[in-house]
Amino acid sequence: MRFNRWVFAACAAAALAACGGGNGNISGNSGPSINVQLIGLENLGARSVYEGWLIVNGAAKSAGRFTVDDRGVMSQTNFKIASADIAGASAYVLTIEPQNDPDPGPTKTHLVAGNFDAARTQAALSVGHTSALGNDFTSATGKFFLATPTNPGTDDQGIWWVDASSGTPQAGLNLPTLPEGWVYEGWVVVDGKPTSTGRFTRVTGADSDGAGPAAGTAAAAPPFPGQDFVNPAKKLPGGMAVISIEPEPDNSPAPFLLKPLLTNPMGSATGPSNGQTMLNQANKLNPTGTVTIVR
């Protein structure tokens, strides 16, 4: 049974990579419809939209586009689908697409997905489905300490995702490998304003901008994700530390809705011996939903 489910999900993923059915809203077609109910989505801004895809006899076919407002309300929930597509549908996948999309097929940014039940009436959607991110991130863990290795003496102005509790610096983050179309990003939120600490796909090695544009010059930064905020100075205690999962390419300079790890507030103790532990909130924030076939 486990093998069959894996094959089913793998076929859905392969179909999405191979083909598509256009980027228009097909709600005007005759025939049955699907009702899509999703919670936990956010406004993607003017440059991106959500698009649903049915996996029909091994091919990905557009099942309608929609947007979400600042309250999380979908612009449309019912989409007309051709009878033949309903008869052959095995799964539903939600992607993030450019608003002006020259490619008729789906992007690789698959947010949630689900297989239809045996009666082909409903699919439960999750980020953990193999055709989405393939993991629900509930086992992710994180530790960091406050320090400014590039400018010693101002240790409340830097954050590094490193675990030094053993005396030897090790990765402070335990995160699953992301599929293509996604990347991790660290954040600090001070006075309500989020600032990126860099993007990364590996928990060891420097992130996308190393010690960051505001780092000092007195010494090198450690080979881990993190950032120093020396010039201009940004004091971090009392603020928030966040690890998010971002679309690649990204639709916004702000943190995306997938935020599996968070510390709020950051404590005032600094230095490698004063590590701080992050709270896993994936179960609370992961988007979920259902797709129901209405005949």
Image (spheres, helix red, strand yellow):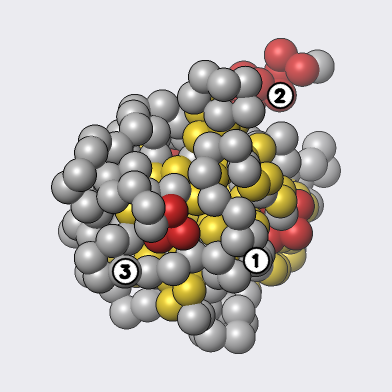
Above or below, comparing residue 265 to residue 224 in the picture: below
Question: Which residue corresponds to the image point at 71% horizontal and 48% vertical from the top-left?
Answer: 280
Q: Nearer the viewer, mark 3 or mark 2?
A: 3
Can you name the residue that lies furthest to the front here? 153
Quarter residue 145 falls in: top right
User: The disc labelled 2 sits on which kind of residue?
Assistant: Arg
Quarter residue 98 falls in: bottom left
Q: Which mark is residue 233?
A: 3
- In the rendered image, residue 255, in percent from the top left (x then y), is placed at 45, 64
Q: Nearer the viewer, residue 200 or 205?
A: 205
Please state if 105 lies on the left or on the right of 166 as rendered.
left
Say which label, 2 or 1, has the lower sequence index.
2
Say which label, 3 or 1, has the lower sequence index.
3
Q: Nearer the viewer, mark 2 or mark 1?
A: 1
Q: Distance between the Cα atoms at labels 3 and 2?
A: 52 Å
The residue to which callout 1 is attached is 265
Please state if 48 lies on the left or on the right of 256 as rendered.
left
Above or below, comparing residue 169 to residue 71 in the picture: above
Can you name the residue that lies furthest to the top here? 3
Question: Which residue corresponds to the image point at 34% horizontal and 32% vertical from the top-left?
Answer: 222
Q: Which mark is residue 5?
A: 2
User: The disc labelled 3 sits on which kind of residue?
Assistant: Ala
Q: Nearer the viewer, residue 212 or 207?
A: 212
Q: Distance between the Cα atoms at labels 3 and 1?
A: 19 Å
User: In the rendered view of the protein, which quadrant contains the N terminus?
Assistant: top right
Above or below, comparing residue 39 to residue 200 in the picture: below
- Label 1 Cα neighbours within 10 Å, binned few <14 / some 14-19 / many ≥20: some
